[in-house]
């Protein structure tokens, strides 16, 4: 058997012609042994084992519906000419959740969530982002179910959103994998109690004790 062409190509520039010719008669392992190189170990299994947390933006991170002159603590950012109030504690709260969950954007913002919010929330990197092909309808969330279900597969999954409706709850009830829906108030967004609920659920998932949305 001839050496693996890829290995041969990679090494050929620094292997004397005498050794290359001899190696052509040996199999790949002999070739590596000749060069006193060890085969690489198997590729590490990097399968994500944390549960997923699907993250809505409007009503969770970008707050609305509060009384004029009574804005919650936060900062305003302009997105496509529209001011958004980003809750001041959101970054720290999602930072805690990122330690136990794979965070995934599930928002009509789609890629704009990475563009505007990763830096504002001090997240370490862009998040995976679901796309909805123009199905987004402000004030509802059932149009997210198909994309969420496809991404979640059979993994444990939580979903935080301010507009969960019956179709969202039906999806959660019918999943066989552990599932948790967390609903926020649009004018308050994510709060410490939501973080604690999610972290507690994630711990139960790890222990094999969680099943479905309460
Ligand atoms: Mg929302």
Image (spheres, rainbow, N blue to C red):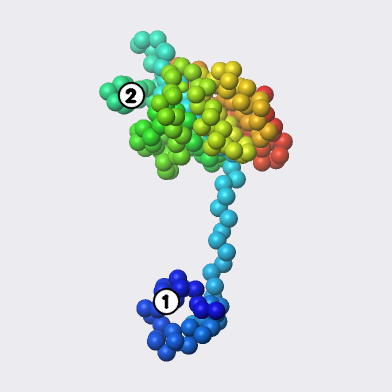
Residue at the location (33% across, 24% down)? 76
Q: Secondary structure at mark 1?
A: helix
Q: Could you tell whether 79 is left or right of 132 in the image?
A: left
State whether residue 174 appears in this view. yes
Count the marks. Answer: 2
Q: Quick one: 124 or 80, which is closer to the camera? A: 80
State whether residue 34 appears in this view. no
Q: Which mark is residue 11?
A: 1
Q: Quick one: 20 or 184, which is closer to the camera? A: 20
Picture quadrant where residue 6 is located = bottom left
For label 2, the residue is 76
The residue most toward the left is 81
Residue at the location (39% across, 12% down)? 70
Residue at the location (53% across, 32% down)? 148
Q: Which mark is residue 122?
A: none
Looking at the rendered image, the quarter that the C terminus falls into is top right
Residue 202 position, x and y percent, is: 62, 36
Disc 1 residue crowd, few under 14, some 14–19, many 20+, Cα 10 Å: some
Q: Quick one: 108 or 22, which is closer to the camera? A: 22
Query: Relative to 42, does residue 64 appear above or below in the rendering?
Result: above
Query: Relative to 139, does residue 44 appear above or below in the rendering?
Result: below
């Amino acid at each position: 058997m001839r050496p693996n062409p890829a290995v041969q190509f990679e090494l050929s520039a620094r292997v004397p012609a005498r050794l290359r010719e001899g190696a052509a008669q040996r199999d790949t392992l002999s070739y590596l042994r000749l060069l006193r190189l060890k085969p690489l170990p198997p590729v590490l299994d990097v399968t994500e084992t944390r549960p997923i947390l699907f993250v809505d933006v409007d009503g969770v991170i970008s707050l609305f519906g509060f009384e004029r002159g009574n804005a919650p603590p936060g900062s305003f950012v302009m997105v496509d000419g529209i001011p958004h109030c980003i809750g001041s504690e959101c970054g720290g709260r999602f930072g805690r959740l990122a330690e136990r969950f794979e965070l995934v954007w599930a928002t009509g913002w789609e890629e704009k969530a990475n563009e505007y919010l990763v830096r504002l929330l001090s997240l370490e990197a862009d998040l995976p982002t679901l796309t909805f092909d123009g199905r987004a309808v402000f004030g509802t969330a059932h149009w997210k179910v198909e994309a969420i279900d496809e991404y979640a597969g059979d993994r444990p999954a939580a979903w935080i959103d301010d507009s969960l409706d019956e179709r969202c709850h039906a999806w959660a009830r019918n999943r066989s994998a552990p599932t948790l829906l967390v609903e926020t108030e649009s004018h308050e967004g994510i709060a410490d109690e939501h973080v604690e609920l999610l972290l507690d659920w994630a711990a139960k998932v790890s222990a094999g004790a969680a099943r479905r949305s309460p």
